[in-house]
Image (cartoon, rainbow, N blue to C red):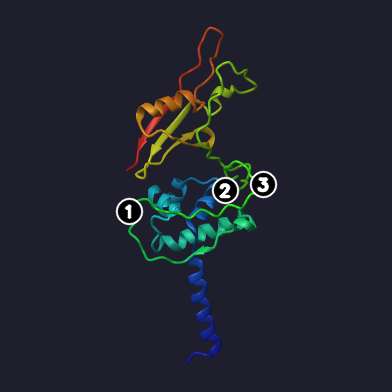
Amino acid sequence: MSTENELFSAVDALLEQVARDDLPVPAERRRLREAAGLSQAQIAAALEARREAVGNWETGKTEPRPPKRAAYARLLEGLAQRFPAPASDAPAVAPTPPVVPEAFTGPASVSAPAAEAPTAPAAAVRPVPAAKPAASSRRPGAKKAAPANTPAGGADPRFENGPLVVVDADTNGTVVAYCTGGLILDVPAKSLPSLVDWTLREAKLGQPKLSGPGRPADPLLVLTEAA
């Protein structure tokens, strides 16, 4: 018969296993990935999952199933140690939900943290994202293109996002553009004409002319389709 210490050790091992499989809330999963400069595709490749599945985990539409759940929890735990959230924004660990098939289940509702009451009447402002390491890739929203006559200072500000992007649309309708140098842009366009308009007016894509008589190069878009 096992001794009392042996029984306690077995119980501690079970508690450790349960704690290891706990996942943070969906919003924190995305924050940790972006803070580390990782893409959904990189995490999907490491866990042998589909990129769309990782996106669903980050929005709370589905939850990973064993054995991917334990591996995903281990990854998030390691990222949380390297990129801790500010004390005021530290999210609680999400309770273990029932297994849901990894398929589109309709729009998910993710509760946003309550904003602090302003000390004086003021216009609504966007929340400032948590600071990220300098080496991490950034994923800003679409930006206004600089005027065509803006003087160049080292790099031409009209084409600061480079000459080439790979545009990817997933099954959830999210459209992103992967630029050179690891930059990722959110694309507001939902149709091909609006994509062309966004590219020419706001995306800051292209390349300055190489000589006086020449003209700037047009941006190059590569369109991909989710499998």
Residue 111 x %, y %? 48, 55
Amino acid, disc 1: Ala
The CA distance from mark 2 to mark 1 is 27 Å
* Residue at which label 2 appears: 35
Asked if residue 217 can be seen in this view, the reply is yes
Drawn side of residue 62 relative to residue 203, left or right? left
Amino acid, disc 2: Ala
- At 53% from the left and 90% from the top, the residue drawn is 3
On screen, 227 above or below 181? below
Of the image marks 2 and 3, the number of the one nearer the N terminus: 2
Residue 35 x %, y %? 57, 48
- Local packing at callout 3 (Cα closer than 10 Å; few below 14, some 14-19, many 20+) is few
The furthest residue to the top: 213
Amino acid, disc 3: Ala
On screen, 185 above or below 60? above
* Residue at which label 1 appears: 103
Q: Could you say whether the residue bearing mark 1 is in a helix, strand or loop?
A: loop
- Local packing at callout 2 (Cα closer than 10 Å; few below 14, some 14-19, many 20+) is many
- At 40% from the left and 25% from the top, the residue drawn is 196
- Local packing at callout 1 (Cα closer than 10 Å; few below 14, some 14-19, many 20+) is few
The furthest residue to the bottom: 1
* Residue at which label 3 appears: 120
On screen, 205 above or below 17? above
Drawn side of residue 153 relative to residue 187, left or right? right
- At 51% from the left and 46% from the top, the residue drawn is 38
As rendered, which of 174 and 53 lies closer to the eye?
Answer: 174
Asked if residue 36 can be seen in this view, the reply is no
The CA distance from mark 1 to mark 3 is 45 Å
Residue 226 x %, y %? 34, 41
The furthest residue to the front: 121
